[in-house]
Amino acid sequence: MLKKTHIAGAILLTGTLFLAGGCGYKTDPVPPDSIVPKAIDDLRYSVSEKGVTLTWTFPKETVRGTDLTDISTFDVYRAVVPMADYCATCPIPFNEPVQVPGGVVDPESNRQATYETALLRSGHKYFFKVNARTSWWAASPDSNVVSFVWHIPAKGPEDVVAVGADSSAIISWQPVTQLMDGLNTTYPLQYQVMRSKDNSAYANVGTPVSESRFADKALKNGETYYYKIQSILMVDGNPVSGGLSEAVSVTAVDQTPPSPPTGITVVQTSGGIKIFWDKSREADVKGYRIYRRDADEKTFKLIGDVSGVYSIFEDANVAADGSYYYTVTAYDKADPANESEQSREAGIRH
């Protein structure tokens, strides 16, 4: 009887120990902040007739601000909602992610990652977001969400023309009337003007416009700029990015003349008549032109041209007893030069 009691006690003790050791709940391991990447905040997309291309920048830091050396993978999440079922306040039904290979983080540059997909259906709204991972268990917070409505896009604009103006460019093109599949458009169209300094990295200029003409007024005279125009189909108020035009280039042209010279003074000398004026303080003045008319003439004629470093001119081709009137203009370094209005006239009268 004593032996059986010992055995029962041993069984009870073993069961007690088993229950005590298994009473906790297992959870996923929590990665330290030192290896969790910061959230991607520049997820963007471009749509063409082939599908959509997502682009984003490799994160360089962890959520704690320490440097990252590499990203193992990116998780790309996609959600698709038929426009007939779309609810603006409903949760976005993201699918399981597609993994995109990562790579080494370059601290000296903004390395870009891309993902392309052509599996799009017309009349559906698409949502995308991205996470970065340093391991299978260390993922960044969600990126910004991008969304768009897919429809057969419109063709790119044609016959784009760019004309340089003063600190600006005027760009015009033919209105787009067809979709990529050749059918006529039935939705309204807008156009996004894109600009580049090197014909490679283009950025949007302003917001889309409805007209087929755009004035870009933020240019530097003498520099060359490149432009492309993208068509945007407005499907029930949702923008569908379409084709891109061919690139055109233009150089902004200085068309602002200097101010007219002041302080015009005329003095007769033994060798002729000397004309003086106040030297311009405008930095782009290249030179001055001197005009003369006889007392019996109504219009001035050009008689001389001097460098901008001078403010004097001598007219030796005059009669000693003649009456003459002079005026001076300033011109700048533009090609062709912009010439100021004529100064007030000053003269010698006998």
Image (cartoon, rainbow, N blue to C red):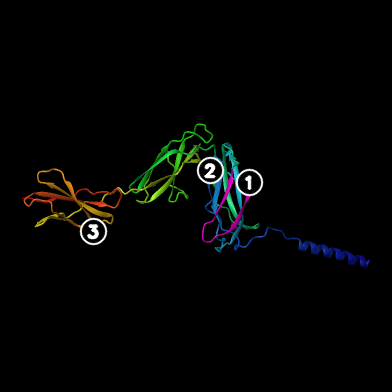
Residue 167 in the image: state x and y as whole percent. Answer: 34, 49
Q: Secondary structure at mark 1?
A: loop
Q: Alpha carbon of mark 3 to alpha carbon of mark 1: how far?
A: 72 Å
Residue 151 in the image: state x and y as whole percent. Answer: 54, 37
Q: Nearer the viewer, residue 120 or 197?
A: 197
Q: Secondary structure at mark 2?
A: strand
Say left or right for 72 vs 148. right
Residue 111 highlighted magenta (yes or no): yes
Q: Alpha carbon of mark 3 to alpha carbon of mark 2: how far?
A: 56 Å
Find residue 233 and name its label.
none
| Quarter in which the N terminus is drawn | bottom right
By secondary structure, the bulk of the magenta-drawn segment is best described as strand
Find residue 47 and name its label.
2
Residue appearing at x 8%, y 49% in the figure: 323
Find residue 95 and name its label.
1
Amino acid type, mark 3: Val
Q: Nearer the viewer, residue 114 or 98?
A: 114
Query: Can you tell which quarter of the image residue 64 is in?
Result: bottom right
Question: Magenta residues?
Answer: 97-117
Q: Nearer the viewer, residue 306 or 198?
A: 306
| Any part of residue 144 in sight | no
Q: Secondary structure at mark 3?
A: loop
Amino acid type, mark 2: Val
Q: Which residue is mark 3?
A: 309
Q: Earlier in the sequence, mark 3 or mark 2?
A: 2
